[in-house]
Each structure stands twice: as structure tokens, then as C-alpha cells.
Amino acid sequence: MHSEYMLSMYSDSTTVCLDGKTTKEIKLSLYTDIGGEAAVNAAVDIFYRKVLKDDRINRFFEGVDMDKQAAKQKAFLTMAFGGPHNYTGEDMRRGHAHLVAQGLNDSHFDAVMEHIGATLTELNVPANLIAQAAAIAESTRKDVLGK
């Protein structure tokens, strides 16, 4: 992951910041670059298999309808990676507030980030695209953790 990149999503474009300074806006194309719908679907399915086996974080998914969860995640990642915008879920802060109340913290977020990277590596996604996906995921940390 290239932590020097901080991506903040605004509609269908992304502001790229280096050292806290905006350098330019770019149109997201990660969705197409990683293989579109089929790749996102495969990644989400593999990702949740990893998450549900991980004792550090699987408790946050107890009682969750995983088919519904996976569908929401697929729609979110499709939008976040620059694909069709069909995401209708809550924003990250509201959607995760109940988990923060249950103790969700940076160590849990880090575990999720590990699984994102491992999943994309398993799918043979090139390192530069994994870095882009990780930067997009990392840009949600404060909202997910309610900071």
C-alpha cells in the first residue's frame, strides 16, 4: 500500500492528495482496470470468506445476512472504483456506527485492509492496482471508525 496517497471520493472523480496537498482530480478507472463486475464480484466473495474465518473481526458479522452484505459491498466497491453508481446504502459513518459502539477500532480496520490486499493478490491483480484499491479503502478509515 502506498500510504502517501490519500483519496477522497467526490461523485465520480477523486481528488489525489500528496502530503495533504491536492495535486489534481482524476476520473476513477480502477473498476475497469481490475476487470469490472466479474472481478469485483469475485473479490468480494473471496474477501468475505477470509473475513469470516478471521477471529479478530468475524464477531462483527454475527447475525448478518451475508448475501445482503456482499451485495451492498459489491455495489459500494463498484461505485468507489469508478464503475456504475448503484450503491444505495448508508454513508460509512452511519453504516458502521453500531460496530464502533461494539468496539470497532484501528486494529480491526487493519485486519480488513490485510484481507483486501490478500484477496486482490490471490486474484493476481497487479500491485499498482492493489495500491489504488488500498488507498481508496484507507480513505474511509476515519468515517468507518467514527473519528
Image (cartoon, helix red, strand yellow):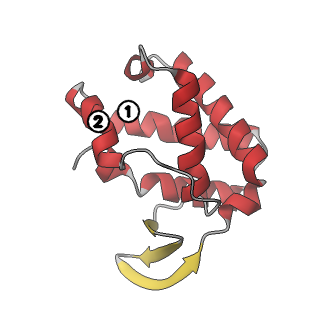
Residue 97 in sight from this viewpoint: yes
Helix, strand or loop under label 1:
helix
Q: Residue furthest bottom?
A: 23
Q: Image quarter for residue 68?
A: top right
Q: Position of residue 30 (x, y in %)?
A: 67, 62
Q: Nearer the viewer, residue 144 or 37?
A: 37
Q: Position of residue 46 (x, y in %)?
A: 67, 30
Q: Label 1: how many residues lie within 10 Å, few (<14), some (14-19) or many (20+)? A: some
- Mark sitting on residue 108: 1
Q: What amino acid type should be assigned to the residue bearing mark 1?
A: His
User: What residue is rendered at 73% in x and 48% in y?
Assistant: 37
Q: Label 2: how many residues lie within 10 Å, few (<14), some (14-19) or many (20+)? A: some
Q: What amino acid type should be assigned to the residue bearing mark 2?
A: Asn
Image vertical order of residue 27 relative to residue 120, above or below: below
- Tell me whether the residue at label 1 lies in contact with that at label 2, contact meaning CB atoms closer than 8 angstroms: yes
User: What residue is rendered at 42% in x and 39% in y?
Assistant: 110
Q: Position of residue 124 (x, y in %)?
A: 79, 45
- Mark sitting on residue 86: none
Image vertical order of residue 39 relative to residue 79, above or below: above
Q: In the displayed structure, does residue 58 sit left or right of residue 116? A: left
Q: Position of residue 98 (x, y in %)?
A: 26, 30
Q: In the displayed structure, does residue 70 sit left or right of residue 31? A: left
Q: Image quarter for residue 144?
A: top left
User: What residue is rendered at 39% in x and 17% in y?
Assistant: 59
Image vertical order of residue 79 relative to residue 63, above or below: below
Residue 1 in sight from this viewpoint: no
Q: Nearer the viewer, residue 108 or 29?
A: 29
* Residue position for label 2: 105
Q: CA distance from mark 1 to mark 2?
A: 5 Å
Q: In the displayed structure, does residue 106 sit left or right of residue 81? A: left
Helix, strand or loop under label 2:
loop
Specify the quadrant that holds the N terminus. bottom right
